[in-house]
Image (spheres, rainbow, N blue to C red):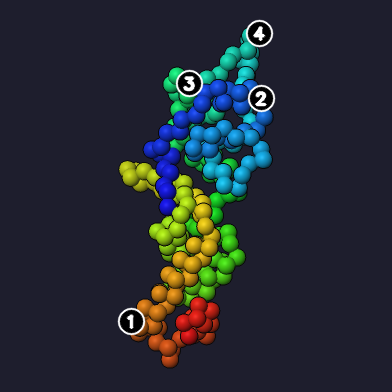
């Protein structure tokens, strides 16, 4: 799993491509790989920016004032020009970035509510049954991050501690397989070692969940 932390990463983009996109006044996106893209966008897009930008604003004077690239993109974007490239620092634009990436993200862990939606019917079914055995969506996400390919797109700082993320999974088949294996192991371990999960005292919901995973 690749980690792209906007609090640390810088994105280098071709200056001419950026200026052409701005001057077109049309919608465009800039990917985390520094590509300038136009609609229709791929479902694999992970963006630091998506939308149209007006290149000029008036200041109340007779002559319009040209804005800097940082001003054009918004307060959270720090843009520096280095030769034929522009370098983006986008850590302070994270809240805006989340909104333009939600459509393609598999998991949203950007709010205080935690991961509510797994975005896949089979993963949701495993989560629904797994909760009877103490498995949370956080456990599922951790298992996928540890074992499957994809990108953890996040804003993460240690001091002060801040963590907010979106998860993009490259292979849902891997995610489903790892989730099932993790939950099966969890159930088997509890049946073998946790007296509160004795086969004789399981609730109907616990039995149904274990049967769903082929354990009972």
Image spot of residue 92 (x, y percent): 46, 35
Front-most of residues 175 and 115: 175
Q: Secondary structure at mark 4?
A: loop
- Residue 137's tag is none
Residue at image mark 1: 193
Q: Residue furthest top?
A: 62
Neighbour tally class for label 4: few under 14, some 14-19, many 20 plus, Cα within 10 Å = few
Q: Secondary structure at mark 2?
A: helix
What residue is shown at x 66% (from left), y 38% (from top)? Answer: 39
- Distance Cα–Cα, label 2 vs label 4: 24 Å
Residue at image mark 2: 24
Badge 3 vs badge 1, beta-carbon distance below 8 Å: no
Q: Nearer the viewer, mark 2 or mark 3?
A: 3
Q: Residue furthest bottom?
A: 200
Badge 4 vs badge 1, beta-carbon distance below 8 Å: no
Q: Secondary structure at mark 1?
A: helix
Residue at image mark 3: 84
Q: Is residue 193 above or below residue 182?
A: below
Image spot of residue 156 (x, y percent): 39, 45
Image spot of residue 16 (x, y percent): 55, 22
In terms of sequence position, does the residue under pointer 2 or pointer 4 come before the other?
2
Neighbour tally class for label 3: few under 14, some 14-19, many 20 plus, Cα within 10 Å = few
Badge 2 vs badge 3, beta-carbon distance below 8 Å: no
Residue at image mark 4: 62
Image spot of residue 126 (x, y percent): 53, 70
Badge 2 vs badge 4, beta-carbon distance below 8 Å: no
Q: Secondary structure at mark 3?
A: loop
């Amino acid at each position: 799993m690749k980690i792209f932390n906007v609090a640390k990463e810088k994105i280098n983009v071709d200056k001419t491509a950026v200026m052409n996109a701005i001057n077109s006044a049309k919608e465009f996106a800039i990917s985390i790989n520094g590509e300038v893209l136009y609609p229709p966008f791929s479902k694999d897009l992970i963006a630091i920016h998506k939308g149209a930008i007006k290149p000029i604003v008036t200041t109340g004077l007779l002559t319009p004032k040209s804005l800097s690239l940082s001003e054009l993109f918004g307060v959270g974007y720090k843009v520096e020009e280095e030769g034929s490239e522009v370098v983006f620092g986008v850590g302070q634009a994270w809240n805006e970035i989340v909104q333009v990436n939600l459509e393609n993200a598999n998991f949203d862990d950007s709010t205080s509510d935690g991961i509510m939606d797994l975005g896949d019917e089979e993963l949701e079914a495993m989560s629904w049954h797994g909760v009877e055995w103490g498995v949370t969506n956080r456990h599922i996400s951790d298992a996928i991050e540890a074992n499957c390919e994809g990108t953890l797109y996040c804003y993460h700082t240690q001091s002060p501690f801040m963590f907010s993320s979106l998860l993009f999974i490259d292979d849902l088949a891997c995610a489903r397989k790892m989730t099932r294996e993790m939950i099966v192991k969890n159930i088997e371990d509890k049946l073998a070692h946790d007296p509160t999960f004795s086969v004789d005292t399981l609730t109907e919901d616990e039995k149904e969940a274990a049967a769903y995973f082929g354990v009972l």
